[in-house]
Amino acid sequence: MCSQSSYKPVRKAVFPVAGLGTRFLPATKVMPKEMLPLGDRPLIQHAYEEAREAGIEEFIFVTGRQKEMLEEHFDFQPELEQVLESRGKTDLLQKVRETEMPAGKLFTTRQPKALGLGHAIWCAKELVGDEPFAVILPDDVFLARKGCLAQMVDAYNQSGGNMMAVTEVSKEDTARYGIVDIAEDNGKTVAVKGLVEKPNPEQAPSRLAIMGRYILQPEIFGILSAFDKGAGGEIQLTDAMLKLSKQQPLHGFRYDGKRYDCGTKLGFIETNIAFGLADPEIGPQVRKTLASLLDETNETDSSHEAA
Ligand code: UTP
């Protein structure tokens, strides 16, 4: 990480976790979507670990009803630790201890109604104060040698301003993302002159899509305070960022690695397979299991065709 930077350091990260997670109902009727497990850790823990790797010191959860489990996951669990210790399960004990948030570093604020991502970020206004901050959407996860946010913090320390993770998507997929209108393409970073929320392929200004990692300046809160509604009747973060880009630089950052979408059923299954294959402990078995499952499916398909 770059230690010599003329810009204020990014010390705080906001985790908006107050959404309803409707695409996962009924799994998310009571359990927060961000508690869905990817491997042996819930999505929120993957997000927390990525933030820590990026040097984040304060973790701000924007929560809502039935989201208490997300805070509890990061609590000290003395009974569990005692049992693991007495059974000599040191590996598991270590894993449990890694989930404990340092004292005084977890902050929560409530979003009473899920009015949109922009509104969720606005709810963290007082906790963030007057400094730059990161935003992590826990349902976007990255497989990368270096965490996506850590890469962005390095780039931010050189450039300052506002930044969002971006990647090229296929033309047909532009309608699923916020799409960037490029002012200048510098390879790793792009200067942004416009943003369009979920454009049809014909209207998309580029194929560069925004992914769920941001570094923002505190002036975004003043813009969000207008509570302007955008696409889907929600208070959109991209609309506020577009307004902010008229006053301050806004960069897209092309990260190294691959992003996975855990916000949809298909994406969640794909992510679990990808992480399973990349896991040094179980990867080879996952590969074998997948191959035999595919063989079985092919056999069943051909016997159906023959019948
Ligand atoms: P999504 O767009 O995936 O919405 O939010 P969602 O409500 O979680 O899921 P669906 O669309 O109903 O299936 C992306 C992130 O922003 C948070 C969500 O918790 C998720 O982490 N969010 C979204 C909020 O905190 N508040 C909101 O009003 C909307």
Image (spheres, helix red, strand yellow):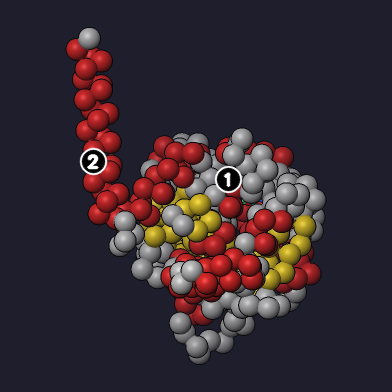
Residue 234 position by quadrant: top right
**152 over 302 or under it: above or below:** below
The label on residue 35 is: none
Task: Identify the residue at the far front of this view.
Answer: 86
Q: According to the image, label 1 marks what residue?
A: 197
Q: According to the image, label 2 marks what residue?
A: 291
SS at mark 1? strand
* Residue beneath the point at 54% across and 78% down: 55
Kind of residue indicated by mark 2:
Ala
SS at mark 2? helix
What is the C-alpha distance between the residues marked 1 and 2?
39 Å
* Residue beneath the point at 29% across and 55% down: 283
Identify the mark nearer the N-term, 1 or 2. 1
Q: Is mark 2 within 8 Å of ligand 1?
A: no
**124 over 176 or under it: above or below:** below
Q: Does residue 224 appear anywhere in the picture? A: no
Kind of residue indicated by mark 1:
Glu
Left or right position of 103 against 156:
right
Front one among 119 and 182: 119
Q: Position of residue 207 (x, y in %)?
A: 42, 48
